[in-house]
Amino acid sequence: MYIDDVNINLSKMTTAKSTSASRPYHHGDLRRALIDAALALVTEEQDWTFSLREVARRAGVSHNAPYNHFSDKQDLLVAVAEAGFERLRERMAAAVAGIAAADTALLACGRAYVESALENPALYRLMFGPALVKPKGSRPAAARQAGNKAKAVLLDTIVRGARSSVFAVTPDDAVDQGKAVFFAWSVVHGLAMLLLDDFLEVELTVGDLIKEIERLALMGLMPR
């Protein structure tokens, strides 16, 4: 298995720790400082088993300070997932910016999605995994809304392709668009998870694999 393309080394990514650290909080937005501190811990430790006390220490505030904004650690993790989705949205939006052709934009969007997952596996698993699921099986509304904003970048690209007849999707049919978005999302999410869980069993670089999966996914959206 060869995975040294696209500036991504999966074996290193799963264990690498960020060298960046949160700056101690002095004044201003305490809530943001706590989220940033928790984000840094998730990224460096590739885990979220740390305590609120650790987050407070990382942010440079008293151990009781987090309770001014978060009822418990789970509440903070929801905010961390929100921040993760916002990063994903920004990355996908930047990837498609300035690309006129909808099919090319879709490929760029998918690549940005997969690379984002591979660069920070723990954050990605927190965003999409079961850690935040409530007892009745529902995800916190805040995280779900943030995820929908990220998904909107993919939707806009699909709609653009539908209106230009690049994709076999009805331009004004929300249900048809939703199916196409779910299909494209399933492809990139499934690919990201298989790579993270080391299920790549072909002698391809990550970059070449992404290109091939993208090509097959586009074929599924193209008019016959």
Image (spheres, helix red, strand yellow):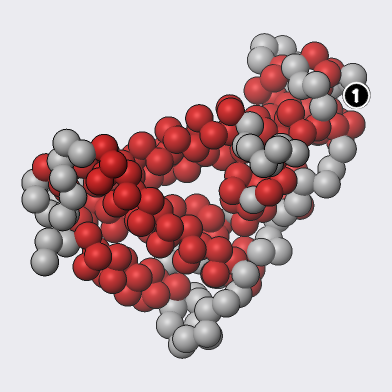
Say left or right for 6 vs 217: right
Write the residue at 68% across / 49% down: 130
Apparent side of residue 190 relative to residue 182 in the rendered image (left or right): right
Q: Which residue is nearer to you in this view: 99 or 223?
A: 223
Q: Is residue 10 left or right of residue 175?
A: right
Q: Position of residue 83 (x, y in %)?
A: 57, 34
Give 92 or 146, whichever is nearer the viewer.
146
Q: Position of residue 15 (x, y in %)?
A: 71, 64
Quarter residue 198 falls in:
bottom right
Q: Quadrant of the C terminus?
A: bottom left
Question: Where is residue 102 drawn, in percent x and y?
Answer: 18, 50
Q: In percent of the image, x 32 and y 74: which residue is there?
A: 212
Q: How many marks?
A: 1
Instruction: In the rendered view, tell whether residue 29 sits above or below residue 222.
Output: above
- Above or below, 65 relative to 9: above
Disc 1 residue crowd, few under 14, some 14–19, many 20+, Cα 10 Å: some
Res. 152 visible in picture = yes
Q: Which residue is mark 1?
A: 63
Q: Please say whether residue 109 is visible from this viewpoint.
A: no
Element at badge 1?
loop
Q: Residue at x 16, y 45 (%)?
A: 170
Q: Position of residue 31 (x, y in %)?
A: 69, 19
Q: Height in image: 170 above or below 78? A: below
The amino acid on which the numbered mark 1 sits, given as a three-letter code, is His
Is 193 left or right of 154, judged from the image as shown?
right
